[in-house]
């Protein structure tokens, strides 16, 4: 685990620069005819943030104590910081940034356009909890179309542990590995979503439905899935090896998953055949 420490020098500079960029009228203040300070005065920021001016002066002089997350949130509001600037402020002060906005189940038009521009590559958008939110035609042909299934039925982790048929598309000797990958990745997502009802409900249902999941959950293994190699046993084109590349959407709770042919394999030819065959036959998603 990386230790986070306060960078007083950079924090002081960022606070000064941010204060100078805020116009008084943007903060609901009257500029007045004799204002010499660009932006806001320290006293004004301190008043807006609910802190003493002396405390802010010490922070801007790189000699103050480490501000709390609550104090940083107040400063971010007073300085009209964007989400990116707010996160930067927290990192400089030695704190983890607060959770940002999430996309939820809504897939942006840009990501949907990206899927459509990959006619020969299986691609899908999956939430950090494992819900399949969008698929292109190749992904539906290879993995099965599950986007229209509601709640946990479209969740790859739920189907892996609660529906035995979901594992038929993968070699039996790799089932244990995939089980650990699913649980470790879900652990990371649940940790980021502390107190989220959807995450809590999913874990509770999985623990009640699968002893295997419950046992793996107790190990508390954490690993975000970013890149891997997988083999799919397709009923039409046979076994295909695929490189799984995971791209994070800006919001962080959605991922674009690309399944590409590994170099030196015949996967590209098999996928080309699958594209011709179309979506008439599916294998279970995993």
Image (tube, rainbow, N blue to C red):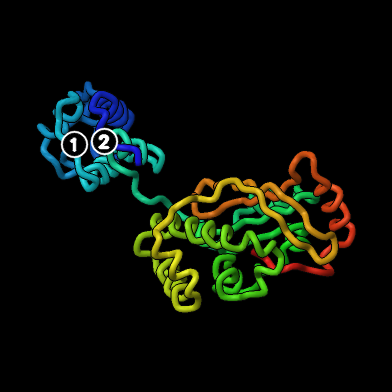
- Residue 213 position, x and y percent, is 48, 69
Find the residue positioned furthest to the top: 36
Residue at 43 percent across and 55 percent down: it is: 221
Residues packed near mark 2 inside 10 Å, few (<14), some (14 to 19) or many (20 plus)? many
Where 54 sits versus 272, above or below?
A: above
Question: Do tag 1 and tag 2 residues touch (Cβ < 8 Å)?
Answer: yes
Towards the viewer: 70 or 33: 70
User: Could you tell which of marks 1 and 2 lies nearer the N-terminus?
Assistant: 1
Q: Quadrant of the N terminus?
A: top left
Judging by the rendered image, the residue that carries numbered circle 2 is 93
Distance CA(mark 1)–CA(mark 2): 6 Å
| Residue drawn at x 16%, y 41% as measured from the top left | 47
Residue 175 in view in this figure = yes
Q: Percent x, y for residue 286?
A: 64, 64
Relative horizontal placement of residue 284, taking residue 63 as reference (left or right): right
Q: Would you say 236 lies left or right of 253 here?
A: right
Q: Nearer the viewer, residue 123 or 236?
A: 236
Question: Which residue is located at x 44 percent, y 73 percent?
Answer: 207
Query: How busy is the neighbourhood of tag 1: few (under 14 within 10 Å), some, or many (20 plus)?
Result: some
Which residue has dot 1 on it? 66
**Residue 109 vs residue 281, the one in the foreground:** 281
Question: In the drawing, does residue 238 fall left or right of residue 106?
Answer: right
Secondary structure type for disc 2:
loop
Answer with the quarter of the image where residue 14 lies: top left
């Amino acid at each position: 685990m990386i230790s986070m420490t306060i960078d007083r020098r950079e924090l002081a500079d960022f606070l000064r620069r941010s204060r100078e960029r805020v116009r008084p009228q943007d903060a609901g203040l009257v500029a007045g005819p004799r204002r010499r300070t660009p932006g806001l005065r320290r006293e004004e920021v301190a008043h807006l943030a609910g802190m003493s001016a002396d405390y802010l002066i010490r922070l801007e002089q790189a000699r103050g104590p480490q501000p709390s997350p609550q104090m940083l949130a107040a400063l971010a509001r007073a300085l009209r910081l964007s989400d990116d600037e707010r996160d930067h402020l927290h990192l400089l002060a030695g704190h983890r940034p607060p959770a940002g906005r999430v996309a939820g189940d809504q897939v942006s038009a840009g990501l949907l356009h990206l899927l459509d521009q990959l006619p020969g590559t299986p691609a899908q958008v999956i939430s950090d909890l494992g819900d399949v939110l969008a698929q292109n035609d190749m992904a539906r042909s290879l993995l099965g179309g599950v986007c229209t299934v509601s709640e946990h039925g479209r969740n790859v982790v739920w189907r892996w542990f609660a529906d035995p048929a979901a594992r038929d598309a993968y070699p039996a000797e790799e089932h244990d590995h995939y089980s650990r990958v699913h649980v470790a990745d879900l652990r990371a997502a649940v940790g980021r979503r502390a107190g989220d009802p959807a995450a809590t409900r999913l874990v509770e249902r999985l623990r009640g439905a699968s002893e295997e999941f419950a046992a793996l959950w107790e190990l508390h293994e954490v690993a975000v899935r970013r890149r891997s190699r997988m083999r799919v046993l397709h009923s039409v084109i046979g076994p295909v090896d695929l490189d799984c590349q995971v791209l994070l959407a800006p919001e962080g709770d959605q991922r674009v998953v690309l399944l590409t042919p590994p170099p030196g394999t015949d996967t590209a030819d098999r996928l080309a055949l699958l594209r011709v065959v179309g979506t008439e036959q599916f294998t279970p998603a995993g």
